[in-house]
Image (cartoon, rainbow, N blue to C red):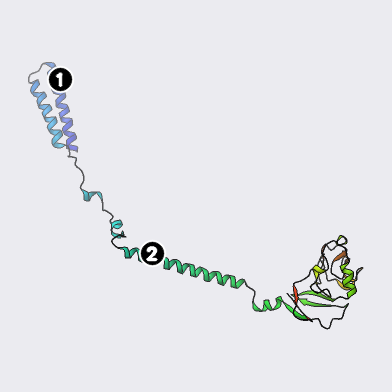
Amino acid sequence: MNSAMNALRLASRISTRGSAQFLAGGKNTALSVRFAQGFQSSSIFTSAPSLKAPALHELGSVDHAFTDDRIDHIAEPERRAFTYLLLSGVRFAYASTARVLVVKFVSSMSASADVLALASAEFDIGAVAPGKTITVKWRGKPVFIRHRTPAEIASEADVSLSQLRDEETDDDRTIKPEWLVVLGICTHLGCVPISGAGDYNGWFCPCHGSHYDVSGRIRKGPAPLNLEVPPYKFTGDTKILIG
């Protein structure tokens, strides 16, 4: 590249001098001009490097991974079937593992045998005389079981719903009319009422003065709701299962 530049500079100088001599009318002007032009052209063509396209190997390596790893599904159909089988097996293993984990998690949330045993309790009420109330314990809560007399049953059945704060008929609160089963917890602030007391001869809460009738319905005082009736059923003539 440096030799080419030097040749160009020399040719330029000779050409300039030849032009000056021609304009001055000197001898051998045409010869000098021709010599300068020939020298300039020959220097350019002989000194300038030739331009040609690079060879294919000079452009870098070629990645043949696509063609080497490509599966021809037409020529090799068994490879496609194997791929589908492998993917299906892996997905089935994932699904089975997820199912086992979900089942174990749900089972861990289920109540144990001792908890289920405490969820229900059976009591013998054969010794409870008419007009009397017993208190039993279920899930750590007191439960009142009252053996009502025919007069008490008739009196509670005659109560009009318009007289009740929490409207509920006596039949809706009992399975057998002679037996009343209610939780012994006042619906005001959770105190335990006194049996056979109050203005209606049912239950009376001395904490804030709530009065319940023989059907466990609130009749007077601050309590907003009737005494709760727990789930229960009779397993015999004198046995009751609560829970």
Above or below, 133 relative to 35: below
Report whether 228 appears left or right of 18. right
Above or below, 65 relative to 187: above
The residue located at (17%, 35%) in the rendering is 4
Report whether 64 appears left or right of 15. right
Crowd band around label 2 with a 10 angstrom C-alpha radius: few (<14), some (14–19), many (20+) = few
Seen from the viewer's position, the closer of residues 112 and 152 is: 152
Direction bottom: furthest residue: 127
Image quarter for residue 119? Answer: bottom right
Q: Earlier in the sequence, mark 1 or mark 2?
A: 1
Classify the position of the C terminus by image quarter: bottom right
- Confirm or deny contact between disc 1 and disc 2 (CB under 8 A): no
The residue located at (89%, 71%) in the rendering is 154
Direction right: furthest residue: 199
Say which of marks 1 and 2 sits in front: 2
Report whether 1 appears left or right of 213. left
In the rendering, at what x and y percent does residue 1 appear? 19, 38
- Can residue 92 be seen in this snapshot? yes
In the rendering, at what x and y percent does residue 187 appear? 81, 66
Look at label 1 and name its amino acid.
Answer: Ala
- The residue that disc 2 covers is 84
In the rendering, at what x and y percent does residue 230 appear? 76, 71
- Mark number for residue 20? 1
The residue located at (52%, 69%) in the rendering is 99
Q: Distance of mark 1 from mark 2, alpha carbons?
A: 89 Å
- Can residue 212 be seen in this snapshot? no
